[in-house]
Image (cartoon, rainbow, N blue to C red):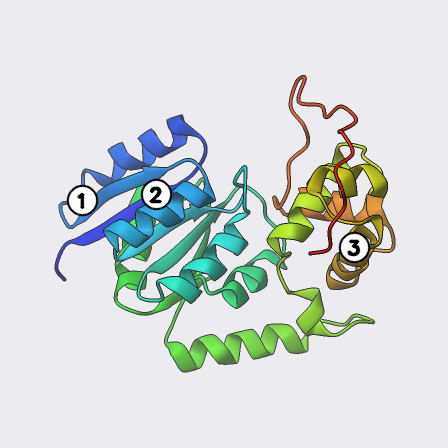
Amino acid sequence: MAGINIVLIDDHPLYREGVKKALTSFPDLTIVGEAGNGHAGMDLLRSLNPDVAIVDVNLPDENGLQVTKRILSEIPNVKVILLTGYTDSEQPIHALRSGAHAYCSKDIEHEQLAEIIRIVASGKWVFEGRVMEAGERQAWLDEQMAGIKSEGSSEDLFAPLTQRESEILNLVARGLTNKQIGYLLGISEQTVKNHLTSLLRKIGASDRTQAVVYALKHGWIRLPEGNDSIESPPVPTPKED
């Protein structure tokens, strides 16, 4: 196989440096760009059009699932490998439904990551140690979805949060009320409630606290760090989305 060009999207510089150094030992793999968040990563992908994007699930702006969906929509030839420090049975399904070609733990061995990059670049999928063609991928997903039992539809349960829902849930995690969130985002309090209702239904949570815990567990949002608190915002004229 010809050389494979890779863009790495992860907000931890030391981790990016470690991956770069590890992959330099493989002459067919080249890191052509790196970014620390989803927006910068998308700009790089549009300009560089690499073969593979390695994307962290837990990014500071958009989560990796949202970035993956944008890549699938805007640059579908780029194959995505999602990396995560979070492990549970649902995450691979979220990743596959978002459009990723592989889902790996961040403590993966470098030789194994290199092989997964090659497999993904060839147009195949790697999930839970299985290499799959397109038909096998769909069969695996159908099998996983058939095993999901919930009161809501599986389609809702495994739909990643929208960017607006992630923004709102991040602010909920910081202790803001619906009214404060509306002021900060420039939308009405009712619109905030509508978004919260939608995301609660998606993830099967009964209240705001459960939703925050679920999103934190999956690496979709982050708790505020240090003095990263939000003061009561000024009151702009609310507008609808």
**Mark 1 touching mark 3, by CB under 8 A?**
no
Q: Quadrant of the C terminus?
A: bottom right
Kindly identify the amino acid type of the residue bearing the numbered disc 2. Answer: Leu
Nearer to the camera, 180 or 78: 180
Compared with 16, 137 (above or below) is: below
Of residue 138 and residue 222, the one placed in the foreground of this image is: 222
Q: Residues within 10 Å of mark 2 (few under 14, many from 20)?
A: many
Labels 1, 2: front one = 2
**Is 116 left or right of 141, judged from the image as shown?**
left
- Residue 26's disc is 1
Q: Is residue 167 left or right of residue 201?
A: left
Identify the residue position indicated by label 2 in the image: 8
Residue 11 x/y as whole percent:
45, 34
Q: Residue 24 at x, y = what percent?
A: 19, 38
Dot 3 amino acid type? Thr
In the image, residue 147 above or below residue 196? below
Residue 57 position (above or below residue 102): above
Give the residue displayed 39% in from the left and 26% down from the top. 14
